[in-house]
Image: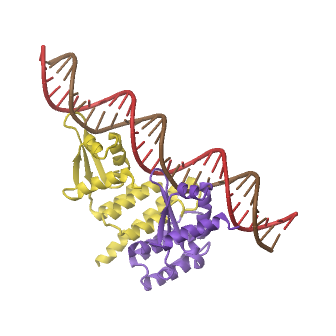
Chain colours: A yellow, B purple, C brown, D red
Amino acid sequence: MPRLSDSIERFIKAMIDDGESRVDLQRNELASYFSCAPSQINYVLATRFTLDKGYYIESRRGGGGYIRVVRLDADESDYLLHLITSRIGSAISENQTRQILDCLAEREIITSREKALIGAALSDKAIAVPIQIKDRIRANLFRNMLTAIVYSNEEGEK
Amino acid sequence: MPRLSDSIERFIKAMIDDGESRVDLQRNELASYFSCAPSQINYVLATRFTLDKGYYIESRRGGGGYIRVVRLDADESDYLLHLITSRIGSAISENQTRQILDCLAEREIITSREKALIGAALSDKAIAVPIQIKDRIRANLFRNMLTAIVYSNEEGEK
DNA sequence: AGAGTTAAGGTCAAAGTAAGTCAAGGAAGT
DNA sequence: ACTTCCTTGACTTACTTTGACCTTAACTCT
């Protein structure tokens, strides 16, 4: 059974793809197109178009209101460095990790196999340590792996 | 009297056989088909569809949830499966890890970037846990990452 | 200009859906 | 008898969908 949220997600991404890297939506219109509650749209945006996934949302209420979804595209190495030096920090959850990986794969900074590889290493299942330190271990692993990618990229240039 | 678990096992295997090498199940549906507790399905999966028997499980909870059972192609990933199920074991040193990675890269089972990626995750530096458990954590991470590769290979074939 | 109306979107909690865990008891094999 | 495997059910966690109520902006009419 395909999830409604997934359909809406695909729909929005399709709109972004054929055009600029952004789109303006009418919440009510979209909701009625999918025959769902308007707040469903907010749910999709909140779960599928997060900053970690590389999207930015802005909106306006009232007459002529809209929701703008912007796909963020930063320079690859800047973004990796940002992740390593600030975003990941000293602890990070599996969920946040996955969002970032989605973002990296979607922008083709990593391959889908690499995404699977990193995701596997950073899953709760794989990191068999007490929950209290899991997120710290994960952050550390993540940073090390991304660093390896940055380094590989540089190697390749030579 | 055939055991329930055996029937369920056969049923799932039959589903995989006529079609692709994988199947998506609904836990509750299957349980009610066999008139048993839903957790019985988990038991069958945990005991009969393990990695060393060549199966990989993934699942999702909530609305639109599912359990996916994937049969890994033993021929394709023979060596990887061997590493996962016997070579790595419950603990492994950084050194042994590197030797295996060299071997994998040399045989072009992984790219050099993937080698760097995995190597980074499995380095003593990255695994920030007490030395007593380091080798165990490493083994676990390694197995999970290689499994992701085997699984990606399956995916890629479609 | 101010008040009221209409047209958006936002929030949050509850209900719905589906899987995971774990422990306790039962059945079968040795 | 003892151990190992199987089965069940109570409880937990994760994700989705809906609806009631709130806020903000624009327009319209005195």
Where D29 sits versus B123, above or below?
above
Q: Quadrant of residue B55?
A: bottom right
Q: Quadrant of the C terminus of chain A?
A: bottom left
The residue furthest bottom is B107
Please state the horizontal and vertical placement of residue B50, each as a whole percent of the image: 58, 70
Please state the horizontal and vertical placement of residue A148, each as a whole percent of the image: 40, 70
Q: Residue at x 48, y 50 (%)?
A: B62
Please tell me how many numbered marks the rendered image carries. 0
The reply to whether residue B49 is in sight is: no
Where A34 sits versus B1, above or below?
above
Q: Residue at x 32, y 51 (%)?
A: A8
Where B53 sits versus A92, above or below?
below
Please state the horizontal and vertical placement of residue A117, each as a whole percent of the image: 44, 69
Q: Quadrant of the N terminus of chain A?
A: bottom left
Pick whichever, B74 or B134, lies toward us: B74
Q: Quadrant of residue D27?
A: top left
Please state the horizontal and vertical placement of residue C13, each as a whole percent of the image: 47, 34
Pick whichever, A148 or B67, lies toward us: B67
Query: Would you say D7 lies left or right of B28 here?
Result: right
Query: Would you say A63 lies left or right of A138 here?
Result: left
Q: Quadrant of residue A95?
A: bottom left
Pick whichever, B116 or A68, lies toward us: A68
The reply to whether residue B145 is in sight is: yes
Pick whichever, A63 or A151, lies toward us: A63
Where A132 sits versus B114, above or below?
above
Q: Residue at x 44, y 74 (%)?
A: B154
Query: Would you say B90 lies left or right of A95 here?
Result: right
